């Protein structure tokens, strides 16, 4: 019957053409160089300072947690239709350049109605590089942060809106910090976003790694958009949190309220 039928293709997909007028190759090579130099520096100091640790005792195999990929490989038709309906309701309230993706399910990982978000068309326009795999709820929360926090702060501090965001990751079926002992990451539910750098419409490039530590307008910009994100997302992590976040901001929804 109709209740159990999955629509072949949701009808909320629409695409708004994006004219890429920013030198992306230049942006990528500058960012990679900064990241590379940062990694070299981090590697050197670690090697110099880290004393040898005694070998960690391995727990018996019976203690090992089940893999997060164990379990169902499909969502029920009701779960998919419910998530697609909720998605349509959410994205109908704003302009999004996105395409719906097939349901993703690997045990505890995945989402019943994920989307690939490419850009937020609008007054300033904002491109995500690469495109992000997110739930619609996370896409909407991201848009709220862009409209209420990111663009006003960019105009005030940098004199130009942000035209491009460089992402480090979105969907990934893994535990937090890729560690076998931690809880499942919101990245595994398509409810998280890692941002490494911003490029303004007038060509300024601001990276979390290079500019967070400074005391100029670029550093103030990063600190203000980080603080503003704490009002919108459930968990916000940046360079203040730990070394793993020295080069990016992590935003997610669905986890337990951390802002650092
Ligand atoms: Zn993250």
Image: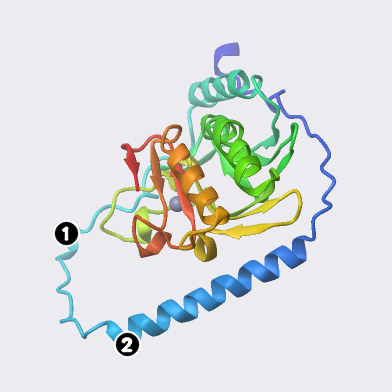
Render colour scheme: rainbow
> Residue at 61% across / 36% down in the picture?
152
**On the picture, is 255 further left or further right than 50?**
right
Q: What crowding class fits label 1: few (fewer than 14 Cα within 10 Å), some (14-19), or many (20 or more)?
A: few
The Cα–Cα distance between marks 2 and 1, rounded to whole angstroms, is 37 Å
Q: Position of residue 106 (x, y in %)?
A: 45, 45
Q: What crowding class fits label 2: few (fewer than 14 Cα within 10 Å), some (14-19), or many (20 or more)?
A: few
Query: Can you tell which quarter of the image residue 197 is in?
Result: bottom right
Q: Position of residue 102 (x, y in %)?
A: 62, 38
Residue 170 appearing in the image: no
> Residue at 42% across / 32% down in the picture?
231
Q: Nearer the viewer, residue 184 or 119?
A: 119
Q: Position of residue 72 (x, y in %)?
A: 41, 40
> Residue at 50% across / 42% down in the picture?
190
As drawn, 103 above or below 260 = above
**On the picture, is 172 further left or further right than 56?**
right
Query: Can you tell which quarter of the image residue 213 is in?
Result: bottom left
Q: Which residue is mark 1?
A: 62
Helix, strand or loop under label 1: helix
Q: Position of residue 233 (x, y in %)?
A: 44, 35
What is the number of the mark on residue 48?
A: 2
Q: Nearer the viewer, residue 103 or 152?
A: 152
Q: Nearer the viewer, residue 148 or 74?
A: 148
Q: Quadrant of the N terminus?
A: top right
Instruction: Please tell me which of labels 2 and 1 falls first in the chain.
Output: 2
Q: Nearer the viewer, residue 85 or 226?
A: 226
Furthest residue to the front? 216
Callout count: 2
> Residue at 41% across / 58% down in the picture?
239
As drawn, 145 above or below 193 = above
**On the picture, is 72 further left or further right than 203?**
left
């Amino acid at each position: 019957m109709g209740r159990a039928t999955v629509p072949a293709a949701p009808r909320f997909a629409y695409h708004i053409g994006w004219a890429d007028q920013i030198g992306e190759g230049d942006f990528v090579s500058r960012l990679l160089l900064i990241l590379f130099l940062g990694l070299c520096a981090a590697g050197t100091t670690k090697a110099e300072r880290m004393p040898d640790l005694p070998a960690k005792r391995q727990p018996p195999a019976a203690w090992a947690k089940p893999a997060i990929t164990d379990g169902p490989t499909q969502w029920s038709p009701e779960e998919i239709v419910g998530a697609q309906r909720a998605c349509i309701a959410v994205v109908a309230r704003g302009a999004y350049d996105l395409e719906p993706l097939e349901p993703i399910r690997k045990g505890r990982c995945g989402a019943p109605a994920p989307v690939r978000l490419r850009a937020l068309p609008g007054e300033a326009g904002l491109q995500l590089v690469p495109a992000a795999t997110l739930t619609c709820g996370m896409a909407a929360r991201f848009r709220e942060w862009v409209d209420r926090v990111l663009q006003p702060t960019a105009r005030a501090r940098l004199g130009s809106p942000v035209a491009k965001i460089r992402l480090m990751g979105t969907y990934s079926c893994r535990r937090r910090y890729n560690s076998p002992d931690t809880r499942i990451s919101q990245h595994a539910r398509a409810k998280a976003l890692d941002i490494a750098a911003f490029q303004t419409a007038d060509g300024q490039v601001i990276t979390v790694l290079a500019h967070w530590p400074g005391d100029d307008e670029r550093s103030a910009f990063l600190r203000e958009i980080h603080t503003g994100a704490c009002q919108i997302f459930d968990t916000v992590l940046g360079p203040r949190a730990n070394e793993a976040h020295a080069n990016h901001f992590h935003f997610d929804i669905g986890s337990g309220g951390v802002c650092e």
